[in-house]
Amino acid sequence: MAVVEMVEIERRWLLADSVNMKKLSLTDGWEQSNITQVYLERHTKGSERIRLRVRLGEVTNENEYTHTIKEPLEVGQLEKEEVISEARFNELMSRINLKHQVIMKTRYVKKIGDLKFEVDEFIHPFAAKILEVEVASLDDEVIIPDCLGKTIEVTGDKSISNFNLSLKPKAAKKKIKKYLDDFKESGRLQASRPAT
């Protein structure tokens, strides 16, 4: 199967309100899939993971297995991803990085205009909702749909990347709690992205 290579630049937000994403998927057309993500042992810079995505359909569910390598760039990451077989997925599981916890999340996706909005509702290692939008530049304007409620931009905060959520879940959970507590205290949206 072919490897797809692309530069990934994304902006990210924490959802500060308790939005019922499952209800939105039923009433507002957000596609839903369950994802199990495992990081693999890697001896070079970047990260390597395998992922099982179960796309929840009206009639049947569809499983998709992917293998992804991400390498850091000055802005964004170089992402190499390929769809793999279940047998290859199980073979790669032998390289699981035991320093990382398994990530389990439900992803909700909706295309609005030219942008694809992806909300990850984390189940494990802890609960959180993070919106990701891939952009051509970090300066691109993103208008977040009202249905997602209030948000806090966390673009560039590597301490709460998926990689670090699985590697350092206690620290990531503490950081997310601080963002939400600060937001509640100030009663307003964060105006700028955190320093990188």
Image (cartoon, rainbow, N blue to C red):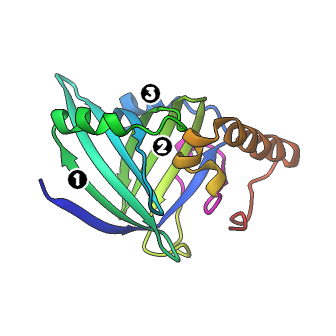
Cα distance, mark 1 to mark 2? 22 Å
Please name the residue that numbered disc 2 is placed on: 119
Q: Is residue 64 left or right of residue 134?
A: left
Of badges 2 and 3, nearer the viewer stands 2
Measuring from the top left, give residue 43's x and y in whole percent: 44, 56
Can you tell which mark lies on residue 82?
Answer: 1
Identify residue type, mark 3: Lys
In the displayed structure, 66 sits above or below 32; it is: below
What secondary structure is found at the residue carrying circle 2? strand
41 horizontally vs 131: left or right = left
Q: Give the foreground label among 1 and 3.
A: 1
Residue designated by label 3: 22
Q: How far apart are marks 1 and 3 (CA)?
A: 28 Å
Q: Taking the image as drawn, is residue 29 in sight?
A: no
Residue 3 appears in the picture as rendered: yes
Instruction: Farthest residue to the top: give it.
Output: 59
Mark 3: give few (<14), some (14-19) or many (20+) Cα within 10 Å.
Answer: some
Q: Nearer the viewer, residue 191 or 196?
A: 196
Nearest the viewer among 124 and 149 is 124
Question: Dot 1 lies on which element?
Answer: strand
* Residue range (magenta): 144-157
Within-10-Å neighbours for mark 2: few <14, some 14–19, many 20+: many
Q: Does the magenta stretch include residue 148?
A: yes
| Earlier-in-chain disc, 1 versus 2 | 1
Residue 140 falls inside the magenta stretch: no
Q: Which amino acid does label 1 sit on?
A: Glu
Residue drawn at point x = 17 percent, y = 22 percent = 59
| Residue ID at (49%, 53%) | 132
Q: Quadrant of residue 113?
A: bottom left
**Residue 63 position in % (x across, y down):** 21, 32
Q: In which quarter of the image is the C terminus?
A: bottom right
